[in-house]
Structures are given as C-alpha cells and as structure tokens.
Amino acid sequence: MAEDSGRRSIGARRNPESAGAILDAAEAVLVEAGYAGFSIEAVARRARAGKPTIYRWWPSKAALLLDVYQRGKRVDNPDTGKLEDDLFGFLKSLFSHWRETSSGSVFRSLIAEAQSDEAAAAALADYARGRRTHTGQMVERAKARGEVAADVDPTLVADLIASYAWTHLLTDRLDEDDAAIRKAVRYVMHGIAVRIR
C-alpha cells in the first residue's frame, strides 16, 4: 500500500509523524489481534505505511515490539534512601504499569518472539542488559550508603528482581498485594537461610 500522502517520507531518517503512526498502529494491532495476529503486514495496513519503510526503521518484528514497549513504559525508579523500599517501589510500579496498560501484553509478546527468533532474542538480551544497569544503580546507591556488603553483585540482584517480575508477568499474576511484593524483596535482601547466632 502506498504511503499516506499526508505524511511525507524523509528517507532513511525516521519522520517522527510517520514513526508515531507506525508505533500507534503496532500497539493497536497487538492489543486487538494478540501476538498470534501481529505482523508487519497488519501494522503497515493500519498505519497506511509501506512495509519497506517499516523494515528500514525497524529491521525485525522484535525491534518494532521493543520500541512500542519502550515508548509507553512509565515505571518509577525510587531513591528513598533504603534499598528494600526502592526495590519494593520499583516492583509495585512495574506490576501496576504492566497491569493497567498494554505494556504487559507487548512485553509478553516480545518474550514469546524471542523463543523462536534470534533477532528477538538479541533485542531482549540488549534490553535486559539495560534493565540490569538500571536496577543495579539502586544496589550501587545502597553500597555507597553502607547498606549492603561491598562484594554484592548488582547485576545478580537485578536478575533476581527481574526473574520475580517476569515470572509474574508470564503467569498473569500481576495483582500481587503489597505484602507479597515486600516479602519477595525481603527474601532477596536478607536471604532464606536460618541465622545461627
């Protein structure tokens, strides 16, 4: 289908208006048709854009899904002065965001795509690296305050927190109450071994 005459192409550089229309269309197709019905063809039809334009700006379905997800993501990055409260606030905000917007659906779709597509797996791995850095900053702040041991690995803590979040997303358990989220964070913070005095 030809490009909408109201949105002129500017070549390889993304035209913000056209890119926005494509991202809007991608999100709408995903919400309406689910992951099984999501395709670049469906997005092109809905956005009234050419497939070559979409593939020029997003080389894979995964790249498009990830941009849709990143564009709508609004999650708190608390800095309360206490790591346990920071991690709790982050998880509570993330669960709420996934539950109340289409972002949960988008991210589930990206994870599904990563199971059978190398480009999607690479895109998800890149995203996870950024996520580790983000959560790891909370741990680094706690180290600087003397709240956690100097040898604690921030990326491992980030993976433990992400594992809890992703498991709840993939099993549709985003309605955890505050007490359950706090308990999970407490386990990460304090471990589960019996303390011998």
Image (cartoon, rainbow, N blue to C red):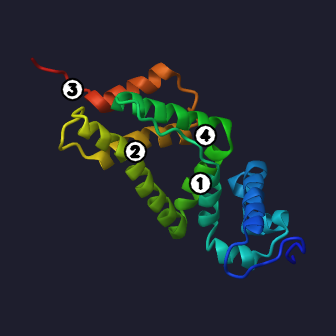
Which badge, 1 or 3, is on the more N-terminal residue? 1
Task: Assign the C terminus to one quadrant of the image.
Answer: top left
Position of residue 79 relative to residue 3, above or below, is: above
Contact flag, marks 1 and 3 (Cβ < 8 Å): no
Of all residues shown, which one is farthest toward the top? 197
Contact flag, marks 2 and 3 (Cβ < 8 Å): no
How far apart marks 3 and 4 lie (CA) works out to 32 Å
Position of residue 132 relative to residue 172, above or below, is: below
Which badge, 2 or 3, is on the more N-terminal residue? 2
Any mark on residue 135, and which?
Answer: 2
Q: Secondary structure at mark 4?
A: helix
Residue at the spot 73% in from the left edge and 71% down from the top edge:
15
Observer-side mark, 3 or 4, equals 4
How far apart marks 2 and 1 lie (CA) works out to 16 Å
Q: Residue 1: give x, y in percent of width and height.
A: 87, 76
Q: Residue 9: give x, y in percent of width and height.
A: 78, 78
Any mark on residue 98, and which?
Answer: 4
Q: Residue 25: give x, y in percent of width and height.
A: 78, 59
Any mark on residue 70, and which?
Answer: 1
Residue at the spot 75% in from the left edge and 64% down from the top edge:
22
> Where does label 3 land, which residue?
193
The type of residue carrying mark 3 is: Ala
